[in-house]
Amino acid sequence: MKMRRFAPENYRRFRWNGWKNLLLPQLNRRSLHVYGSEVAVEKECIRQKEGGVIVIHPFSRLRSYYIMCMVAITFLNLIGIPMEIAFLDGNSGVGWEGFNVFSDTLFLIDVGLNFRMGIITEDSEGAIMDLKSIRQQYLKSWFIPDMVAAFPVGYILLIADLHYHSDSPSSRASKMMRILMFVRILSLVRLLRVSRLVRFFNEVERVSNANLEVMRIFLRILSLFMMIFLLCHWNGCIQYFVPMLEEFPSDCWVRRENLMNATVGEKYSFGVFRALSHMTAISYGSSETPTNEVELWIVMTSIVSGALMYTVMVANTAAMMADVDITARAYKNKINHLEDYMTFMKLPKALRMRINNYYQARYGGKWYDEKDVLKWVSSSLREEILLTMCSAHVRKVPIFRNRDINFINAILLELQYEVFQAGDVIIQQNAPGDRMFFIEHGQVLVENEFFQKELCDGDYFGDSCLLTRGKRLATVQALTICQLFSLSVDTFYCVLEDYPDIKKDMESSQQDKDILLC
């Protein structure tokens, strides 16, 4: 078999398009939750392609991989930086110095990438992909903390080491020690990367393809335990770091435990043991009480941090128990009642699965009643909500174009929200026409013996029955999960009675059509 060979320009175009596709939004639970349907996600891909500007979409595959990588590197930095400052004494080795330089470079690149990273906000219906808006939001929010946290300390050490490389060993050691003492203090600013870790955890939920509620709880528990671990780890490093700054006084705990010539592992283990002893209020970390003022303040700070740790744990546990979504609990109760009913009625397994899938598609794991929700707001807000949701759909129908706004609002108030699963027959040919439909999200197939046509978001069907009350001319079947709004014929005529001029105009238009058909 001969392999197909690409011309150089075609090969470059193929590589560029393949790389550029990594910037486009991928299809997952979160993107479907934001955009509503597969068709809407595809439209978002087309919108980004036609934009002509390279911007990383927040739901793109590249963003997903990048966040996972940054979570791991940030966590390693938050573990390694305190250990380097407290225990390594400038003898970190080529491997750790290389990792420092690599991390500093990556965090500086991250600052630049944030100017081309799409933004998803809670109140937006899609991603913000405009470069000017992205730049303004980033400069107003996290730019300064990110720049401080990305301060390239690794570069300073590397440049200093190269600069004094030709000096004599004793002179070089003296100069490097002075630089190291300065850099150790300066390195503390890199601990601000903990804010990035929290932000990356929040973004992992957005790119995850797992169940949103389960992922949210899992990440909340994981982030809590990671923060507790970092608090204990930092506290253990501080236990050794402060006596080291004082050049190990004769009465400090490091000398009492004979750790001056111990290995890094022993020093770290004793430091963490001492920190945990304070934080859990078991002891002072040894058989003796603090012997100087500095050590006393360290112990008190550790005890207070331990109390705060307990407070945070209890508060988060209580919040997670109380914050289990009320609507999700109501949905679970409804599902349990439904399961009991289906078991009692001995419904077949396939039908049970379809019913469960319908409830999941209809309510998305949360129980609410649209009619009750709309009753809780004022009439003007109710009209505005429905106008925002459905007005564009209704005005696409020819008989509703250029009509009085009051008539349109009256029609909107009568729309009913319905959900159909893939494969459901929404309309059967030759059946009596009782209502028309507007597609909010989803795809349907309209077919009869003469034609086939697919409809998607924003389209409508079944409108012929409103004026003729005739039989259905085609069968309409759902190809995907469809979220629709329906308008019944009876309700339409009830509304029409309050607008006699519009009724007369519609009837005359229909008579003209009948004459033409004759």
Image (spheres, grey):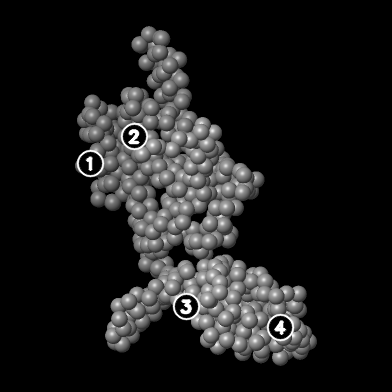
- Which residue is tagged 4? 517
- In the picture, the disc for residue 286 is 1
Q: Residues within 10 Å of mark 3 (few under 14, many from 20)?
A: some
In the visual, does 493 lie left or right of 213? right
- Which residue is tagged 2? 83
Mark in the foreground, 1 or 3: 3
Question: Residue at image x 56%, y 69%?
Answer: 453
Q: Are marks 1 and 3 in contact (CB under 8 Å)?
A: no
Report the amino acid beneath label 2: Met
Question: Residue at image x 49%, y 38%?
Answer: 15
Measure the alpha-carbon separation of dots 4 and 1.
101 Å
Look at the numbered disc 3 and give the secondary structure of its residue: strand
Residue 485 in picture, x, y percent from top left: 57, 76
Residue 120 in picture, x, y percent from top left: 54, 54
Look at the numbered disc 2 and give the secondary structure of its residue: helix
Instruction: From this view, report whether residue 190 is shown above or below residue 514.
Output: above
Res 349 quadrant in image: bottom left
- Which residue is tagged 3? 425
Q: Are marks 2 and 1 in contact (CB under 8 Å)?
A: no
Mark in the foreground, 2 or 1: 2
Q: Residues within 10 Å of mark 2 (few under 14, many from 20)?
A: many
Q: Specify whether residue 265 is in view.
A: yes
Q: Earlier in the sequence, mark 1 or mark 3?
A: 1
In the visual, does 316 lie left or right of 17? left
Report the amino acid beneath label 3: Val
Measure the alpha-carbon separation of dots 4 and 2.
87 Å
Q: Earlier in the sequence, mark 4 or mark 1?
A: 1
Give 332 or 502, whichever is nearer the viewer.
502
